[in-house]
Image: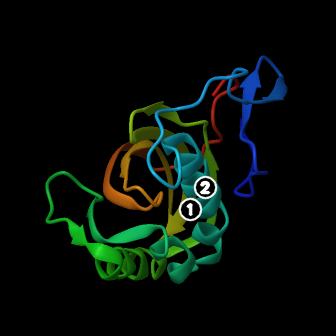
Amino acid sequence: MIGRCGLASLFLASSGNRAQKIEPASGQRSASITGMDAETAARRWADTWSHPWPQRDVEAIAALYADTAVHHSNPFHEPGLGPAGVRRWLADNFLVEEDMECWFGPPIVSGGRAAVEWWAWWTEQGQELTYAGVSVLHFDDQGLVVEHRDYDHHIEQLQRPYADW
């Protein structure tokens, strides 16, 4: 388990029963994008989501998205466009999510893109739900999200991440 929705500036990853800090190898960086590299942007994205999601802070999350952002929360629905689309999606979901907890893994980065695993649970209209998923992100030269795609699975019960998640 990585930790409860309040990650330090460095992500923690589970190794057996001991959590370890994940740091880039000496001299290694993700591909640089002007202003902010994708790894830094992805870590900022996950850290930002980890705090405001349970607190239902729409503005803190929407501030991560560029004006031109396309947010695909579901591949079979129309995407949200720009921070306004992200705000709309968040507001709709935050209305029904209660007793929310979440965890984020370290990003996997290639060029200006990153994938970030996450695990979350909440109660929605009396039903306990657990979601495990990944967000695939593309960042602009300022480290803002220009494309966000979510893929996830869920069960109708609360379940903590498995031991070596």
For mark 1, does the 10 Å Cα neighbourhood hold few (<14), some (14 to 19), or many (20 or more) residues? many
Which of the 4 image quarters holds residue 26?
top right
Say which of 9 and 25 sits in front.
Answer: 25
Instruction: Please tell me whether mark 1 sits on a helix, a strand or a loop.
Output: strand
**Which disc, if any, is residue 21?**
none
Say which of 96 and 72 sits in front.
Answer: 72
In the displayed orientation, state which residue is furthest to the top: 16
For mark 2, does the 10 Å Cα neighbourhood hold few (<14), some (14 to 19), or many (20 or more) residues? some
Q: Three-letter amino acid code at disc 2?
A: Arg
Q: Is residue 12 above or below residue 137?
A: above
The quadrant of the picture occupied by the C terminus is top right
Residue 118 image offset from top left, x and y in percent: 53, 44
Side of 124 where 56 appears, left or right: right
Q: Three-letter amino acid code at disc 1?
A: Trp
Which residue has dot 2 on it? 44
Side of 79 where 161 appears, left or right: right
**Which disc, if any, is residue 122?**
1
Q: Residue at x 65, y 56 (%)?
A: 47
Which of the 4 image quarters holds residue 49?
bottom right
Q: Is residue 3 above or below residue 78?
A: above
The numbered mark, 2 or 1, whose residue comes first in the sequence reads 2
Residue 140 image offset from top left, x and y in percent: 37, 56
The quadrant of the picture occupied by the N terminus is top right
Q: Is residue 63 above or below residue 131?
A: below
